[in-house]
Image (cartoon, rainbow, N blue to C red):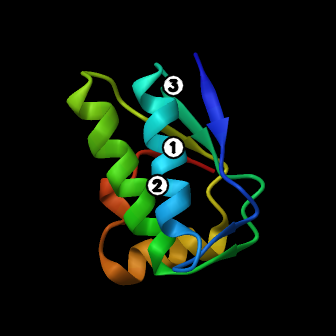
Amino acid sequence: MSRFETGAMLTHASAKAALAAGLERIAGGATGVDCAPLTQFDSSALAVLLAWQRAAQARGAALDIVNLPAGLASLAQAYGVDTLLSSRH
């Protein structure tokens, strides 16, 4: 499986660039994203992860999200999108 990593920061300020980079990796065949480096994030990170998932699904693949930080998982739960993220902590 081909997996890429998020950067250390995924906030509103960096979301557009992160989205584009991830979409490029997914278009190239990546089927997973490792969130272990992620230390600074806001709700924009959820939007990016969901967009990456949709892009992978459009290619007929699932996006394996691993090492989702606990704080981001809590944020996803608060927004009610935790069930949409196929993640392993």
Residue found at x 76% / y 70% = 39
Q: Is residue 52 left or right of residue 12?
A: left
SS category of the residue bearing label 3:
loop
Q: Which residue is mark 3?
A: 30
| Residue 57, percent from left and from top | 26, 33
Q: Quadrant of residue 13?
A: bottom right
What is the three-letter code of the residue carrying label 3? Ala
Relative to residue 16, is residue 12 depicted above or below? below
| Residue 40, percent from left and from top | 71, 76
Q: Is residue 70 left or right of residue 54?
A: right
The first of marks 2 and 3 along the sequence is 2
* Of the pair 86 and 30, the residue shown nearer to us: 30
Q: What is the C-alpha distance between the residues marked 1 and 2?
A: 5 Å
Q: Which residue is mark 1?
A: 22
The first of marks 1 and 3 along the sequence is 1
**In the picture, which quadrant includes the N terminus?**
top right
